[in-house]
Image (spheres, rainbow, N blue to C red):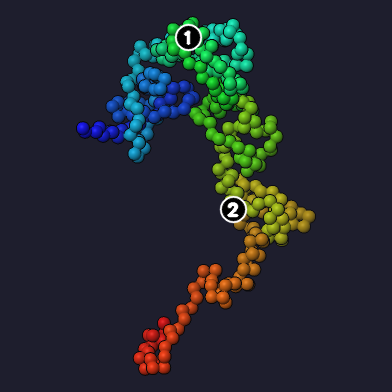
Amino acid sequence: MSQTVPVTPTRVAAVRFQRVGKLYHFDCSALPDLRVGDHVIVETVRGEQMGEIAAFYPPEEGHTDYKPILRLATPRDLLLKQTWEAKQPEALIECRAIAAQLGGYEQCKFLAAQYSYNGELLTVLYATEDNKLNVNRLKNALSSNFPARVELRQVGPRDVAKLIGGMGACGIPRCCSTFLTEFSPISIKMAKVQGISLNPSEITGMCGRLRCCLVYEYEQYVEARKGLPKRNKRVRTPHGEGKVLDVHPLQDAVTVLVGEIRHLVKREDLIPLDELEALEKKAQGGCARHESGGCDCGAKRPKAAPTVSEDDDDNLTDADAWE
């Protein structure tokens, strides 16, 4: 029995299902006329969904399991999507009312109700700190009140901020609501490397988590710090020997205390004393293992002259004597 060989796609489309949502990749080889901004119908684990083409990419080498785009969305599909989207606020209000009537969902915050483009699926997004909360009762009650298939999906604090929107601490709309499609892992170390105050009000976003913008310049700070000495290191400067008090990665400089005076010194004018003294000490000491027959400095030992007997002297050539 012959096996079907998977066909490698020639073009891959990045599709998003929300205005600022994660990108999913589909095979669009069968639709060469697709353009960025077109709406298409695709098959997902949640059934048929309508998405928007965000970009095109060449397929990854060895990756052949892209799902194909089913078809281009028709004017009727777009009209259905608009109709069902208009019903979403009403569905959310009804969902909250049903939850209040059932009781036991006081700790739940219902954020959005989202219909699929054809109204076959209704997804209710909620947030709660009680991860053991049983939502089956609510799901059954909603299924009996709505003709669509109902799903309840729990989201985290950052997704809550993304859905609600609003202004960030910097005074402009939140990054998560305007352009961030995925949330990157963020740690306190990123704030420390950038010299940001660890005051919670300075590094915490509206969601109560570390601000997403901490990751934006982190790699540049790490790269800039590589050529600069750390705090409390002893260095030699044009002003004399001193101790590093502060590091300024973006200026490619450090603040050095020489005597009682502070100086801002550029990287090219710095000589690290600890490393210099260590190298000088090693150079003066030589190789500790040469005398014992070994070597740890990488230098080649001179090749020993061959041992010959007195009878072999007449047969020894000039070339043999230099080996």
The answer to whether 296 is drawn above or below residue 8 in the figure is below
Residue 224: x, y in percent? 58, 48
Marks 2/1: CA–CA distance: 62 Å
Going by the picture, which residue comes out furthest to the right? 260
Q: Is residue 192 above or below residue 202?
A: below
Which amino acid is tagged 2?
A: Gly
In primary-sequence order, the first of circles 2 and 1 is: 1
Residue occupying the point 42% across, 88% down: 308
Q: Residues within 10 Å of mark 2 (few under 14, many from 20)?
A: few
Rendering quarter of residue 78: top left
Judging by the rendered image, the residue that carries numbered circle 1 is 143
- Residue placed at 34% from the left, 39% from the top? 62
Q: Is residue 296 left or right of residue 204?
A: left
Which x, y percent locates residue 246?
Answer: 69, 48
Q: Nearer the viewer, residue 311 or 86?
A: 311
Please state which amino acid type lies under the numbered disc 1.
Ser
- Please report the residue visible at 41 percent of the width from the left and 82 percent of the height from the top: 323
Q: Secondary structure at mark 1?
A: helix
| On screen, residue 205 above or below 269 | above
Residue 82 in view in this figure: no
Q: Most extreme residue toward the front, as rendered?
A: 1
Name the residue furthest left: 1
**Residue 223 visible, this angle:** yes
- Tell me the SS state at disc 2: loop
Q: How many marks?
A: 2
Q: Nearer the viewer, mark 2 or mark 1?
A: 1
Say which residue appears at 37% left-offset and 94% top-offset: 314
- Residue 8 left/right relative to 249: left
Left or right: where does residue 280 sit relative to residue 74? Answer: right
In the image, residue 171 lies at what x, y percent? 63, 27
What's the mark number on residue 227?
A: 2
Image quadrant containing the N terminus = top left
